[in-house]
Image (cartoon, helix red, strand yellow):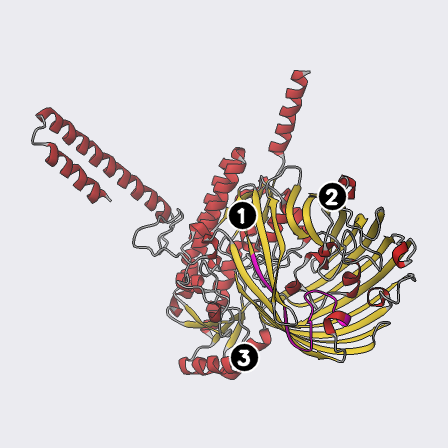
Amino acid sequence: MKTTIVALLLTLAGLSAQAKLNVVATTPELAAIARAVAGDRADVVSLAKPTEDPHFVDPKPSFVVKLARANVLVEGGAELEIGWLPPLLEGARNPNLIRIAIAPGIQLREVPTALDRSKGDVHAMGNPHYMTDPINGQIAAQRIADGLAQRDTAGAETYRANLAKFNARIEAKMVEWKKLLAPFAGKQVVAYHNAWPYFGERFGLKIDLFLEPKPGIPPTPASLAEVITKMKAEHLHVVIVEPYQNRKTADTVAAETGAVVVPVTQYPGGVKGTEGGYVELIDYLVNAIAKGLAQ
Amino acid sequence: MKIILLCILLALPAGVSMGAEDSELDALKKMMLQMQQQMQQMQEKIQQLESAHTNAPPVAAPVPVALPAWTPSQPITVARSGNAYMNMSFDALVNAGWSTERNVNSVLNLGDHDPSQRGFSLRNAEIALDGAVDPYLKGFANIVLKLDNNNETEVELEEAYGQTTSLPFNLQLKAGQFFAAFGRQNQQHPHAWAFVDEPLIMNRVLGGDGLRNVGTQLSWLVPTPWYTEATLGVFNGGGGTTFSFRDTGNTYGRTPVDRGLSGPGDLLFVPRLASSFDIGDTQTLVLGASGAFGPNDSGSNTWTQIYGVDAYWKWKSPEANGGFPFVSWQTEAMLRRYDAGADATVSLPAETLEDWGFYSQVLYGFHLGWVAGLRGEFVSGNAGVNDTNDVLLRGDRFRVSPNLTWFPTEFSKLRLQYNYDHGQAFGDAHSVWLQLEFLLGAHAAHKF
C-alpha cells in the first residue's frame, strides 16, 4: 500500500515536472522576453493587449482565472499596473504564485521627491516605461531567467542558455541600432506621453516635449499651441504616437509644423512589424524613428 | 571600501602593537597580505566577468545586467506609495440640484447616499484604509461621514474586515462588517456607481444603506475553465443595514418583535454564484445569481427570502486610451418574499408581501473622460393590507435617468443627471442633480 502511494506520488511529481510552466506577464513586452527565455518549457500569456493603454487595463474575471492557474507572474513592478493588478491577485487567491518584478533591478528615472497630483498622474516610484531601453530588456531577461529557474530547477540550464542567446542578439543588434541613430545624436523628438526617456537616453535622443500638458492629462488647444510654438522655434519635425493615443491630435500638430508622425509602440504587436518579439520591437522603433528624423 | 578596510586593519595593529608580541604582529601582517591577495583576485574576476560581457561584440555602453547595488550617494526616496503599510484615501461626493418634490430624502431619494435635499448636500465622504496585515491577511476599512439635512455629521463604520490571502483550494475567508455579495451594485461603494442615486429596487428590498452587516463569508474560485466564484455569507442579520430582515425599524405596520437569535438558523445567509465569459478579445460578460434568507422582525416566526439575478456586459476598444471608448450594460432584477406576521393590536393579518423590480443601465464612454448614461427602472409588488401606509415602499414606481459624466482624471468627476420619476406615492417628479467627486491619496483599485 505504502509503496503504491509513494509510486503514485512519484509519478505525479514526474508528470508535474514535465508539464509546462504557466507564466502570466502583465504586459506584452515582458511576455515576449519570458517566451524567449523559457523557450518551450513554458506557456506564456500577456494580460494587457499590445494596442491598449497599459495604465487602464480592465481587471477582467478571466484574468483572475489565468492568475489562479499560473506558476509565475512577470510584472513591471513600478506601479504601471497598480490600477488593475491588485484586484486580480486578490481574486486569484494563489499563494504559490512566484512573482518576478522587473523594476527592482532597474534604475528608475524621474523618481518624484514629493507626491503631488497637481503635476499630473506621476508615478510614485518613477517613470515605469523603462522597457524601451534594450539594456533594461536584458535586465528583465536576467530576472525572468532567475525567477523561472527558482520555480523549475530542472530547466535552469535551458533558461541560462536562452538568456545568453537573447543577450547576444541584443548586443549584436545594439551596434546596428547605435549606428542607425548616431547621425541624430542630441536631436529632440516630440511624444504624446512621457514614455520614452529610457529609449532617448540609450540612443542619444531628447524625447522631452509632450502633447500631453502633464502626464495623463489630455491635451487642450492651449497646451497644443504651446507645443506647436516650441516645435517651430526648435525646428522639431518628428512626433511619435502609440496605437491607443489620439492620432488626430498628433496629425493636427504635424500639419501645423510640417512634422511627420511616426507610429511607435512599447509592446510587440502594437504596430505592424513588431509582432516578432522584443528585439523586433526595438528594431522597428530605431528604424522608424531614424527614418522620421532623416526626413 | 577597500581603503576603509585597510585603514581599519592598519589602525588595529598600531593600537595593539605596544604590548603585542612579534608573533602576533606577524600573524596580522600575514592576514593582511592574504586579504590583499584575495581582493586582487576578486578584482580580476570582476574584470574578467565585465570583459566577457562587453568584449563579445564591441558594444559602446557597458551592460550592467546585475542589480545595481545601493550606494550612500544615491538618494533614498521616502514618499513612495509602495513604502507605506497601507493605502489611505479620502473620497467625497458633493451634490447640488433641485427637485419638484420638496421632501427629497423622505419621498424620492431613499438611498442613504443619494442627494438628500434641494440645493446642496453631502452624503458620502469616505475614509478608506487598506493594506496587508501580515502574510496571511489583508485588512480593509471604510469609514463614512455624511451630513444630514440639518448639516449635522453622521458617522458610520461602513466596512471593516479582514480577508485571507493564502488559504489553499482557491478559498478565501472574510470576516467583519462588510457589504454582502448580493448582486453587483450592492458590493460597490457609492463613488464607483454610474448614477448619483441607488436603484429603486435596491432601496426597496436591500435597504437605503445596502445589504451589509457583521458576519463572515467564504468564497471559492471554482476550477471551471471560465471564471466562476461561489460565495456564502453568514451575517447576524439585525439592524437597519439588513432592512428586510431583523430590522425593528421596518415591519410594514406590525409592532416590531425584537426576536434576537434563538439559534444559528436565525442568522442571515447570503449565497451567490457568479460566472464570467470573454466574448472575443474586447467583450466581457458577467452573470450572477444571489439569494438572501433570514428571519424578519414583523413576527416571532416570520421569514424573508430575496432572490436576485444580475448581468454585466462591457465592450472596450482594443485601442483604448485611458479606458475609452467603451460601452457597458448592467441590469439587476430582484424579488423579495417577506412574511409579515399577524398583529391583532393593529388588526393586521399574516400575509406574504411580494416585491419585485429591476433596473437596466447603459453607459457609453464616447470620448476620453466622457461617459453618457441612461438608466430605466421599475418596481412593483402584490397588494398588502397596510399598503396605504407603506405606499412609499410598496407602490408601483418607475424612473428614467439620463446622465453625463466628465472625468478630468481618474481622481475626480463631475456628473449631471436628470430623473423623471413617477410613483403611486407622489405622482410625477422631476429632479436635476450635479455631483462632484474628488479623491485624495492612494485608493485600492476596483474589481471588474
Q: Which residue is tagged 2?
A: B224
Q: Which residue is tagged 1?
A: B132
Q: Is residue A167 left or right of residue B164?
A: left
Q: Give the residue displayed 48% in from the left and 81% down from the top.
A: A228
Q: CA distance from mark 2 to mark 1?
A: 29 Å
Provide the chain ID for the residue under circle 1. Answer: B
Q: Is residue A153 left or right of residue B418?
A: left
- Residue, far front: B345
Query: Three-letter amino acid code at disc 1?
Result: Ala
Q: Is residue B307 left or right of residue A24?
A: right
Q: Nearer the viewer, mark 3 or mark 1?
A: 1
Whether the magenta-drawn stretch holds residue B120 is answered as: yes
Q: Which residue is tagged 3?
A: A220
Query: Three-letter amino acid code at disc 3?
Result: Thr
The magenta stretch is B107-128
Would residue B148 be seen by someone viewing this image from the given angle?
yes
